[in-house]
Image (cartoon, rainbow, N blue to C red):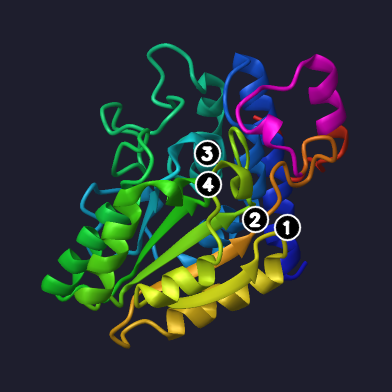
């Protein structure tokens, strides 16, 4: 089996984890998590230079990832578990009282893989830039990656951070935008129009790449290109076109699945569309 197919298989299992986790607690955010399953899978199983078995909060001499849109926690928890940060069986505790797998990632529970709390939107780029500058100061050649929702870009702090990143030539950071064009209340074009995102980021001094977040091969090529462009005095952002609810036909493209859980019948239908490849938890 080739690398691309292995990653696709893993992403399918991750999607199964997402719908099961959200269903079991009747709480969570399946739509965006499903849409980013390919990206997070590619990042952790192919791109990041990391040490899952010896996790440290400071992440010295390894690549770092910060999930700014923390409501996508289900996809991150699944990938962290499947890539060895903690037991896969712990996914059963998603959103349970006292669990390490809270609805939004936190640091209080000391869950391996989590370095910041990310419940409030808009903060992850600032944190990522700080971490990237710290690596520069320490002579650490590794990279920092961040993920943001497109609706999250309506937060003013994002653009303050964008100005800072370009001003200080933070060229060891790769930001990624989950560009599905919908948010909890509807299309981003109707809630608060973001266009043209490409022009905005370029005007703020960033190198902009675009990719298809639902195609594993294209994703890997774009991430490799982004990595090749680091160290050139300019921060990088990837506008990643995705589909809300990717992989489950009745969820796809609908903002209604931003933050509701499937019922029993809907879960069965979703699972029938997602191949079990690594074994359910």
Return the disc, 1 or 4, that comes first in the chain's sequence. 1
Foreground of the two, 75 or 155: 155
Q: Quadrant of the C terminus?
A: top right
On screen, 230 above or below 37? below
- Res 23 → quadrant: top right
Query: In the rendered image, which residue does mark 2 sit on?
Result: 38
Identify the element where label 1 is drawn. Answer: helix
Q: Are marks 1 and 2 in contact (CB under 8 Å)?
A: yes
The residues bearing labels 1 and 2 have C-alpha atoms spaced at a distance of 7 Å
Q: Are marks 1 and 4 in contact (CB under 8 Å)?
A: no
The residues bearing labels 3 and 2 have C-alpha atoms spaced at a distance of 13 Å
Query: In the rendered image, which residue does mark 1 sit on?
Result: 8
Q: Residue at x 44, y 78 (%)?
A: 227
Identify the element where label 4 is drawn. Answer: loop
Residue 40 numbered tag: none
Q: Which residues are magenta?
A: 253-270
Q: Can residue 189 be seen by looking at this rendering?
A: yes
Q: Position of residue 196 (x, y in %)?
A: 55, 67
Residue 72 numbered tag: 3
Residue 192 numbered tag: 4
Return the disc, 4 or 2, that comes first in the chain's sequence. 2
The nearer-to-camera label among 4 and 2 is: 4
Q: Are marks 3 and 1 in contact (CB under 8 Å)?
A: no
The nearer-to-camera label among 3 and 4 is: 4
Return the disc, 3 or 4, that comes first in the chain's sequence. 3
Q: Is residue 221 left or right of residue 214?
A: left
Crowdedness of circle 4 by 10 Å Cα count: few (<14), some, many (20+)?
A: few
The residues bearing labels 1 and 4 have C-alpha atoms spaced at a distance of 34 Å
Q: Quadrant of the N terminus?
A: bottom right
The residues bearing labels 3 and 4 have C-alpha atoms spaced at a distance of 21 Å
């Amino acid at each position: 089996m080739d690398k691309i197919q292995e990653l696709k298989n893993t992403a399918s299992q991750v999607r199964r984890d997402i719908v099961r986790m959200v269903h079991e607690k009747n709480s969570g955010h399946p739509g965006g998590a499903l849409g980013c399953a390919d990206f997070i899978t590619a990042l952790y199983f192919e791109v990041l230079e990391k040490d899952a078995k010896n996790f440290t909060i400071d992440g010295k001499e390894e690549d770092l990832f910060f999930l700014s849109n923390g409501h996508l926690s289900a996809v991150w928890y699944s990938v962290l578990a499947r890539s060895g940060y903690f037991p896969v069986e712990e996914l059963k505790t998603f959103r349970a009282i006292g669990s390490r797998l809270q609805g939004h990632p936190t640091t209080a529970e000391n869950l391996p893989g989590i370095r910041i709390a990310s419940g409030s939107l808009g903060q992850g780029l600032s944190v990522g830039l700080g971490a990237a500058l710290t690596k520069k100061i320490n002579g650490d050649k590794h990279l920092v990656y961040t993920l943001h929702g497109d609706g999250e870009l309506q937060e003013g702090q994002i653009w303050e951070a964008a100005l800072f990143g370009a001003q200080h030539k933070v060229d060891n950071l790769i930001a990624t935008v989950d560009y599905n064009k919908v948010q909890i209340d509807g299309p981003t074009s109707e809630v608060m129009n973001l266009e043209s995102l490409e022009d905005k980021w370029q005007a703020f001094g960033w190198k902009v790449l675009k990719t298809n977040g639902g195609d594993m091969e294209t994703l890997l090529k774009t991430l490799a290109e982004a990595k090749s462009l680091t160290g050139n005095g300019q921060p990088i952002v990837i506008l990643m076109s995705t589909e809300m609810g990717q992989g489950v036909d009745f969820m796809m493209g609908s903002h209604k699945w931003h933050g509701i859980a499937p019922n029993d019948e809907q879960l069965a239908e979703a699972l029938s569309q997602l191949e079990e490849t690594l074994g359910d938890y």
